[in-house]
Amino acid sequence: MIVFTLFYLIFGGAILLIYRRLSLRSVRAEMAAIERISSFITQGEGEVMIIGRGIAKMSFVRCLVFVADRTAEDAVETMQIILRYYHIESYLLKRIEGSSSREKAYYLALLARLPISKVVAGKVSKYMKNSSSDVRFYALLCMLAAVPELAVRYISELDERLSRRDIAEMLSVIGRGYCPIPYTPLLLSNNYNMQLLGIAMVRRFGIYESCKDLMHLVEYGEPELRMDALEALAYMSADCSDDSCSGYVV
Amino acid sequence: MIKVLVFSPSFRMRAMIVGMVTCSDVEVESVTSRQALFRRCSEKLFDKVIIEDYRLFMNGSDAVRRIKIHCACSPRIMVLSSIMDERIVLALLDCGVDEYILLPLSPTRLRHKVCGR
Amino acid sequence: MIATILIAFILFVVLLVGYWLTYIYRTFVRTRLFALSAVSDIDVVGGIGISLLSPSPININTVVGLLDSRYPQSEVIVMLDSTKRPNMLEQLKIRYMLSQTLADNVVYRSRRYIYSRLLVVDVAGINDLRQQLDIAAKYASFDYLFVIPSSYRLLPYAVGRVAEAIASQNMSKVDRIEVGEDGVEIVSRVELRKSGGFASKSGYLKRSRSICIAEPLIVEKVAENSHCLLIERSRYNFWDFLAFKIMKYKNKLLSLKK
């Protein structure tokens, strides 16, 4: 016990001391990168980052993803200029090829959060058959981000059921506007994943016009989806006095 | 010269907002903690305060009064958040927040709101 | 002979450290993936709501810290004995404009919507912690109960991370969530009631219906500014994650020594 305590304290102390010095420098580099990226997409001009000297390429990609996640559609074109200039797509695709499935999922997740070109969809489609569920899911997200027009087709062709967390993540890609999907075909379809996505979408965006479709789901939907539909109605403070809800309201 | 104070618990968010609003007409400062935010607001009168931490107004710390300590109408408090729930938005506006900006945001619109151009 | 024992011991330590580092790396990879999307900061995940139960918080900053949780669908239920800590109750009533509800004299809610996530339950005359928790659970609005001991501080993304962990599974089959080495757990309110509540001696939730989150979601003391940076970076940088874990172990060892 004493030996372990000493070992932890010495080992831990050494790591903390060394890393404290290094991490502050990389924090400053990331802050500078994010400032320059934000300034560039606001003004349309700015200083170019020299990758390798000021900041590592992977850190720069993370900074780009951070900004892309929090900026709306009108910044997409400028973001795409940055992606093309630094060859980010090919860099990430190369990294995905040569990594383990855990790392693959992470790089695919990074790619899905950027405004990628349609070419990427063809290159990541092979990962839809990967043995890891995380890799399959993030490959799907990449394809949704790359070719949003075919989003409904990709989701309907899935063999497995998505979890509610997967749906929430899909919504965050849709919410940025890269992947506009109408909610009505989702709610009225017979596909479990599409219905779940539709329910999450109307709840997230507060689409009150969908209440009738939700009540239809409460009455005729799959047992697993009825609670979700009812909850979405309650969250939107919809009128639950309809007959379809009467069995659930106490 | 428009004086702007930026606060977010996340260093990346601070950097992003500073990058978007910085221009020749704007003097931008950023703070890293809530205590520093209140202290800086009491020391200097800012035109605009941009906050990406809406919880600050919902935990009873009387944030609006402490930010607008010099004058009831200045600085203009702008809150950035991704929460779409209208009840929370209305509650924030009701407690004294001047503007609620939804994330993901438009950089040019944010700059226009801050700089006025 | 001594040399052999020494070599064997060193090899054993190296293997142990290697195994521990692999475990830390796997935990980190999961953390990084969840932190990238941080969907629970934006929206309610899977319709899951979590009630945070705080038995007898040390001071008002504890309550402020719990209200800082970023997950939209959460509430804070504070259990306070008005006979032993009347000042604390008064402070809360003034700060959050609390008033007794008409239905029940022991429950205090705020008149303002902005503080509607806070509920104070007066547990005067009840000394048993488990009975206090059962009373608080009765007033909880959400499906999952997260009991936070008063000596801990919750990280802002912790509640959302728990909701995401539940939403990643088949939700109807999750009754208990354990948080790593901290010995803290979140339980389903419905199943807790079926098993007799916290105070029941026969209260037992099946292990097969529980999941474990290995990431650190709570810290032993209030994080200072420098620790805030470490905590933020630990979600996407392996070495910061390792440093944060070591810091937690160090704090735990030091608190055990005391």
Image (spheres, grey):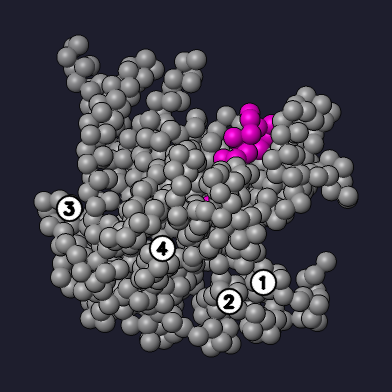
Q: Amino acid at mark 1?
A: Met
In the image, A138 versus B111, the foreground residue is B111
Point 79% across, 81% down: residue: A242
Q: Which numbered disc covers residue C129?
A: none
- The picture places residue A58, in percent across and down from the top left corner, at 21, 56
> In the displayed structure, does residue A235 sit left or right of residue A5?
right
Point 64% across, 84% down: residue: A209
For marks 3 and 2, give the CA distance: 40 Å
- Chain letter of disc 4 in the image: B
Label 3 or label 2, whichever comes before in sequence order = 3
The magenta region covers: C54-71
Task: Determine which residue is flagged by label 1.
Answer: A236
Q: Say whether mark 3 and mark 1 are on the same chain.
A: yes
Q: Amino acid at mark 4?
A: Val
Task: Determine which residue is flagged by label 3.
Answer: A56
Q: Are marks 1 and 2 in contact (CB under 8 Å)?
A: yes
For marks 1 and 2, give the CA distance: 9 Å
- Chain letter of disc 2 in the image: A
Q: Which numbered disc covers residue A202?
A: 2
Label 1 or label 2, whichever comes before in sequence order = 2
For marks 4 and 2, give the CA distance: 32 Å
In the image, C213 versus A79, the foreground residue is A79
Circle 2 SS class: helix
Task: Determine which residue is flagged by label 4.
Answer: B114
Q: Amino acid at mark 3?
A: Ala
